Image (tube, rainbow, N blue to C red):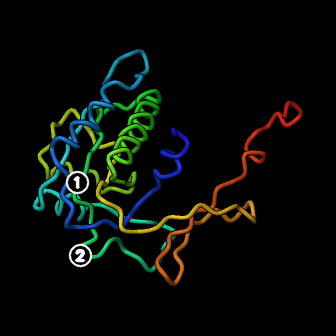
Amino acid sequence: MLKQLVKKNRSYRRFDGTVRITKTQINKMLELARLCPSAANLQQLRFFYSITGKTNDIIYSHLSWAAYLKDWHGPKHGETPTGYILILGPSKVSKHLLIDVGIVAQTILLGATELGLGGCQIASVNKTELHKALSLPKDLEILLALAIGKPVEQVVIEKVIDPDDIEYWRDEFEVHHVPKRALKDLIVNKKEL
């Protein structure tokens, strides 16, 4: 069951703009984040969420989408995310805090997937300008943005053929293809297999 949830949790970048994210759904995702392990149990991460059109538009305008898709500049009108969660942390980021960000982001997106939603982790954020636009607390910085909504795109996992070519792509039917390395290529102590 967990493997199916992980396989279904892809980086979705196109959403059904008519399916609104509810505060209840956001709270369920953030409750999972609250329960995550934290280095030294410091629990330094904080969250800013948006499920309203105006704030969603502000966040959207400060994001860059899908670096490998050179001719695609993000979801078109009607396919933008209907919710966002910004993961925030202290301005002096420690290496352990970034580990916490990864754990929390994956957990939130697994929770979104379980709710029939999907999302995308976005690190390419104009953080300074977005911080100002949202009047976020000065002692917190934006570490990662999560775009959330009801996916309208199909994402297919492909085998990596050329180990130097791991770029995702879209075909003529707008199916998003994501190459993943084989397990045997990731394990270094192959004699134990």
* Marks 1 and 2, the one that precedes in the sequence: 2
- Dot 2, crowdedness within 10 Å: few (<14), some or many (≥20)? few
Does 107 sit above or below residue 130? Answer: above
Does 181 sit above or below residue 104? Answer: below
Apparent side of residue 105 relative to residue 191 in the rendered image (left or right): left
Q: Furthest-top residue in view?
A: 40
**Element carrying mark 1:** strand
Give x and y (percent) for residue 130. 21, 54
Q: Quadrant of the C terminus?
A: top right
Residue highlighted by disc 2? 77
| Disc 1/disc 2 C-alpha distance (Å) | 14 Å
Does 20 sit above or below residue 173? Answer: above
Residue 36 location, quadrant: top left
Type of amino acid at the residue the image marks with label 2:
His
Q: Nearer the viewer, residue 155 or 123?
A: 155
Q: Which mark is residue 64?
A: none
Residue highlighted by disc 1? 83
Contact (CB < 8 A) between labels 1 and 2? no
Q: Nearer the viewer, residue 1 or 191?
A: 1
